[in-house]
Image: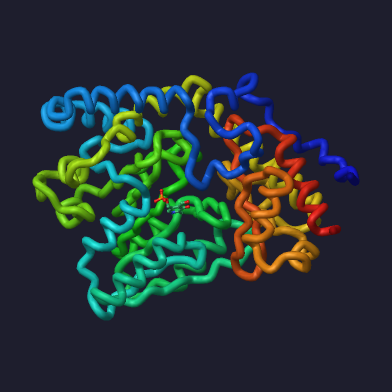
Amino acid sequence: MPRPPALDASLSPPEPLGKNLLEHWVLDRAITYLNHGHFGACPRAVLDAQTAWRQRLEARPIELLERQRRSLLADARQAVGGFVGADPDDFGFVTNATGGVNAVLRSLKVEGGDELVTTNHVYNAVRKTLHLLARTVGGKVIEVDVPLPVRGPDEIVAAIAGALTDRTRLVVVDHITSSTAVIIPLKRIIDLCSERGIDVLVDGAHAPGMVDLDVAALGAAYYTGNLHKWVCAPKGAAFLWVRPDRQAGIHPNTISHFLDQGLAEEFQWQGTRDITAWLCARDSIEFMGQFGWDNVRRHNHALAVWAQATLSRRWEVPAATPADGSMLGSMASVPVPEAVRRHFPDAAAVQSRLLDQYRIEVPVIDWSDRWWVRVSCQVYNEPGQYERLAEAVMELAAQ
Ligand SMILES: Cc1ncc(COP(=O)(O)O)c(C=O)c1O
C-alpha cells in the first residue's frame, strides 16, 4: 500500500481522553465506525440505566406513567435545560428533531403569499415538510444556494440576506448541516432576521453535545435539538424549545389531554409511549460529562479538523470548509477523488464497498454533483481509523 504524504507537523491529532474508550460502547468491534452523526451511539452504562427505567415502568406502569411522570420528567428537563441553556418550562420533549421541526411547521398559520426561506443544505426530511406545508396550507419554499467549498460565514449570511423580502414569513436553518457538516453562523442570521421581524426555526439536530449551546441566548423563535446524537442518549430523546412569546401557537404533532397547558405538559404526553429515553437524559449528560464536556467537544473538534486535513491532502481535493476548522464541529465532509467515480455507479455503491471490503461504516453522500465522505469524530474514535479510510478510498480510485 502506498504511504500517505507526511502530515503537516503543525496539525496533529488530539490526545485521546482516556485509554480504550470504545469499551464503554457496545458498537460492533469488527466495524470501523465513523458515522456517529447518523444515529448517535448510546454507551453501555446509559443503556443499562434505560433498562432499569423500563423495568421500573413495567413493574408499576400506573405509578410511573401517571403518578410520577411529572416529577420525573421535571428532573429530566432540569438536566437538559441546564445543559443547553434553556428554562425547563420553555421546551418540550420530542422523539427526534424531525418531530420538533414538524410540530412547528404544522402549527404555523402560513398564507398563500408567505415565503419560507431555507438553504440547499437543508435536511431532506425538513425540505419535504416545508413542501407539504406549501402544498396544503400555503406559502412558497425558497432555497438559497450556498455552494461548497464555503470560504467563510459571510457567504452564508449574504446568501440568506439576499433572499429576505417583505413576504418572508420564516427562515429555516440548520445549526450544523447534515450532509455537508458546516456550522452555520446562526447568531448573525437570527439577528439579521429579528431586525426585519422574521422568525427563525433552527434545526439543531447535531448541535447538543457537539457545540457549547445557549439556546435562549440565540434568540430564535424555535430551536429543536437531538440528545440521541452527540449527547449519546438512547434513541428517541430530543427537545423543542420555543421562545415564550411564540409558545401559545405551537402544539405537538399528536394532540392529547394537556392541550393549552404549557409547552412541557403538552409535549410530554402525546398518548402512551416509552418515556425512558427522556428519563435517561440526565444519565447521558453525566456519563459523557465524566470526561469533561469541554474536553469532549475540544477533542472531537480537533479530531475532525485533523481528519479533514488528512483526507483532503491524501485525496488531493478541497474540503467543504476552511482548513482552520472554524466552520466545523465534530464532523467533516470531504469529496472522494474524481477517479473513484469512474468505478462506481453512485455514491451508495462506494459506501457499500467501504463497508463490505474494508469494514468501514461511513456515509458517502451525493450532494451538488460531488460524492462526499462525511466522517464523524467521537471520543471512541482514533486517528488510525481515518488513515485507514484515506487509504481504502485511494485503493478504490486505483483499482
Ligand atoms: C440537520 C438534521 N436535521 C434533522 C435530522 C434528523 O434527525 P432525527 O432523525 O433524529 O429526527 C438530521 C439527522 O441526521 C440532521 O442532520
Residue 34 appears in which quarter of the rendering? top right
In x, y percent, where is residue 7? 82, 40
In x, y percent, where is residue 240? 30, 47
Q: Looking at the image, can residue 61 be seen?
A: yes
Residue farthest bottom in this picture: 113
- Residue at the image point whose x is 41% and y is 66% from the top: 127
Image: 173 above or below 230: below
**Side of 59 relative to 376 (left or right):** left
- Rendered image coloring scheme: rainbow
Q: Looking at the image, can residue 149 be seen?
A: no
- Residue at the image point whose x is 68% and y is 43% from the top: 359
Image: 19 above or below 150: above
Residue placed most toward the observer, 215 or 70: 70
Total marks shown come to 0
- Residue at the image point whose x is 32% and y is 53% from the top: 99
**Side of 330 relative to 215 (left or right):** right
Residue placed most toward the observer, 299 or 40: 40
Quadrant placement of the N terminus: top right
Residue 302 appears in which quarter of the rendering? top right
Quadrant placement of the C terminus: bottom right
In x, y percent, where is residue 348? 62, 60
Residue farthest right in this picture: 2
Residue placed most toward the observer, 317 or 336: 336
- Residue at the image point whose x is 23% and y is 31% from the top: 73
